Amino acid sequence: MKGSTHRRCYCRDPKTGKPLGKKCPKLSSRKHGSYSIRQELPPREDGTRRSFSRAGYETLKAAQADLDHVRALIGLTDADDPEGTALIADMLEEVGDEKAPLPDVEETRRRLKSGQDLIGRLTVGDWLDQWLDGKRIRKSGVTRYETDIRMHLKPRIGHHRLDRLRVSHLTEMFTAISDANAEILEQNAQHREALDELATVPWKGLANRARRKSMKAAIDAMPPFRRVTGPATRQRVKATLRAALNDAIAQQVITFNPATHVEIDAVRKPKALVWTDERVAKWRETGEKPSPVMVWTPKQTGAFLDFVAGDRLYAMWHLIAFRGLRRGEACGQPWSETNLDTHFLTVSAQLVQDGWDVETSEPKTDSGYRVIALDDDTVGVLKRHREHQEADRAEWGSAWVETGLVFTQEDGSWLHPGKVSDLFERLVVASRLPPIRLHDLRHGAATFMLAAGVDVKVVSDTLGHSDTRITRDIYQSVLPQVGKNAAEATAKLVPLQRKTEAEQAAREAAKAAGKAKKKAKAKGKGKKKGKQKKPKE
């Protein structure tokens, strides 16, 4: 197809005001004017002609290079491919109208072969919506992704073209989130100060009531209390975007994932600490927990289980405390997967929350499917629980809800995981033991197994971890006595010639006695010499 380069200027006739074009007398100078290109494109579907035009090149060489680039793009399709030819022509027409850079020839060839949009009009927001619609995971997972997309990703980077998303865009996004956090903290502090000041104003008196009314109006006009976006949430937002962009790469929509290269603050996972006597004393004095994750000692766990022995869900607390089931796994454990004769149960289902709604789900990972051995005492506890459940079934009669689960409400219906956690917290407060969360019973189970010398691989399998490193990093809280025993065993490995403290004291005493004896002997000799007769003069 026809294409050409030409030089022109934008000088105008001083009399008529019309462009001089090629008639400009200054065009004879190479430094005057600029070069332009024009390339004929395949006609539109209705047969009308169209072309690609661009001006403003300083040199003929630069203009010719872009003209060759346009021709190379047109040459990507064969004459017997009218659909591909039309796509290339549409792309070049839009690029020319938008004055956008010419697309890379090889990238365009790849997009053409894979059936992708040649001009990359897909935005990050459009792709995230498309990606989320295609997710086939449990509802709570979709809700989490949707929250990240709606609250953070679309408002901040959704307008960017997907194929032009860069690491710098993501760095700016997370910087903006940090700046917003600082603003939220400041606004929350101002709101709190205003409420505290309002609390000091008396109710009585006309002036006081007027002041209170004015202060309340000012407080109502303030932004409401808001939560900041913490490090864990920022990491989760990054993970959501990384997963979405990885799928875009898999579908050959893009070739680069900037979310894998952006750096944000790392999340330091809290280590589980044991409620030692010293920590309990400080907690009783200040009311502060040393760590978000706290673990009871065996004695404290036994005291709690004794305290709740008459609770209807005692068997659940016992099972979590000794075998480390997750809350949702315990709530969703069916009798069909609980074999008390062989002392095993199989974790194959769980109840999960989506907001406040509850749904049944399979374990999140393959390692979540697992067989857990039961000790004799736990089997006895579950047998007594089953007897009580049978009595409840008979009492409710036709109103009984048959769910087939081990732990249920009084009428046999599902337990709400959130209400189970609330009940546990109330029982802990009533027991007057130091506070832990329900999930911390699971931490305790892992700690007790490790302290009892159970192989870490067995502990990891019991807990449903995919890697033993997770078990070591998160759950290996060493009980004080276990640590003391380990220290003593380590010290005994090193041979030392030092005497024990008793031996050293005895040696020092003997040494002191010897010195005293020598001193006394020396005094005795001195006295004996003094008694000798004086020589005659």
Image: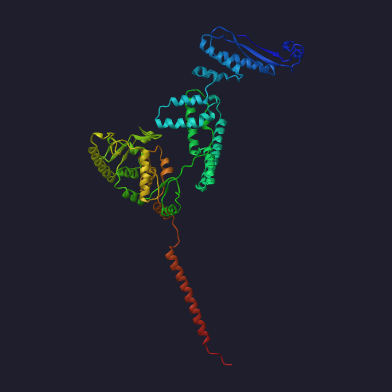
- Residue 308's place in the image compared with 368, above or below, is below
- Residue 136's place in the image compared with 481, above or below, is above
Q: Residue at x 36, y 38 (%)?
A: 417
Where does residue 125 sit, x and y in percent of width and height? 51, 26
Front-most of residues 132 and 82:
132
Q: Residue at x 34, y 51 (%)?
A: 303
Q: Quadrant of the C terminus?
A: bottom right
- Residue 486's place in the image compared with 68, above or below, is below
Tell me where residue 109 sits by quadrant: top right
Q: Quadrant of the N terminus?
A: top right
Horizontal side of 477 relative to 190 (left or right) equals left
Where does residue 514 sit, x and y in percent of width and height? 47, 73
Horizontal side of 333 relative to 79 (left or right) equals left
Front-most of residues 37 and 524:
37
Where does residue 213 sit, x and y in percent of width and height? 52, 42
Front-most of residues 120 and 456:
120
Horizontal side of 422 relative to 260 (left or right) equals left
